[in-house]
Image: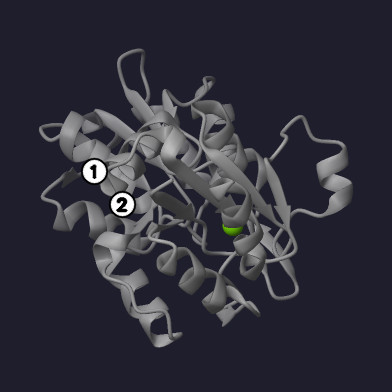
Amino acid sequence: MYGAIVDLDGTVYRGGELLPGSKTGIATLREAGFDVLFFSNNPIKDGVAYAESLSEMGIPVTPDETCSSGVVTTDYLTREHADDEILCLGAECLREQLLSAGLALTDDPERCDVLVASWTPEFAYGDMQNALDAVDDDTIFLGTDPDRTVPMDDGAMPGSGAIIGAVAAAVGRDPDAILGKPSEVAVEVALDRLDVPAHQCLVVGDRLDTDIAMGERVGMTTALVLTGVTDYADLATSDYRPDYVLEGLSDVETVLAELDE
Ligand SMILES: [Mg+2]
């Protein structure tokens, strides 16, 4: 084992506050020789923003050691759609990431080659109209991440998945791809960064349908933490079976102990 994909929200921190023991858990992984990639499905921050916020919280990381659905989406569009015009129904921070990468954005549905749907607090009826006008049979329709909700201190708010679902209903078809965890594109980006094969990679996260689903599908070792959106009751009724269930990230040493045996 040489690589670890560690989720952020609900795993390392929650609502901007470090979770107890998460610093220790990261230190344990690093001391055991793991390269760590912090991977959030949040589409609005890039690697630089995550490196800054984690370092401020006392976990020093470089932008290369972080990834997000925004980074994966930007990376994918740069590789596959560099010459296409993109209509982005998403937050300004996501649009800025796409523009910084030299991608061409349009607000004109007639010119749209690729429609990207993502979280934005400003999602409105007009966005569904634009999507409906933009999408025909050969328009590529992408979503940044499937997260239906985003955990907040006092509950949750609708996430990208909710908006992608509304857009999909408006245009009458599912997206061609949703790019964050657990997608194949996300796996490729993460394993490429860590430079390990899937079976030498540990994924730690709080969501069964993204973190654990991704690891399970490609043969990573999976560890669910109970510090986020999933509790024992959710686990009991789920088809996903994480290899390990941890009370928190600090318990990752029990995983490492068993992997050594
Ligand atoms: Mg999470």
Residue at 54% x, 29% y is: 168
Q: Secondary structure at mark 2?
A: helix
The location of residue 89, given as percent across then percent down, is 40, 47
Q: Nearer the viewer, residue 167 or 145?
A: 145
- 200 up-or-down from 224: above or below: above
Residue 119 appears left or right of 157: left
Residue 233 appears left or right of 209: right
Give the amino acid type for the residue marked by disc 2 in the picture.
Val
Q: Name the residue carrying label 1.
A: 75
* Extreme-top residue of the structure: 137
The location of residue 47, given as percent across then percent down, is 29, 63
Q: Looking at the rendered structure, which numbered label has been put on residue 252?
A: none
Q: Nearer the viewer, residue 32 or 214?
A: 32
Whether residue 21 is visible: yes
- 24 up-or-down from 111: above or below: below
Residue at 57% x, 45% y is: 211
Q: How many marks?
A: 2
Mark 2: is the Cβ under 8 angstroms from ligand 1? no
Disc 1 + disc 2, Cβ < 8 Å? yes
Q: Secondary structure at mark 1?
A: helix
Determine the CA span between mark 1 and mark 2: 6 Å
Q: Quadrant of ligand 1?
A: bottom right
Whether residue 180 is visible: no
Mark 1: give few (<14), some (14-19) or many (20+) Cα within 10 Å.
Answer: some
Q: Looking at the rendered structure, which numbered label has been put on residue 71?
A: 2
The location of residue 19, given as percent across then percent down, is 63, 77
Residue at 46% x, 85% y is: 57
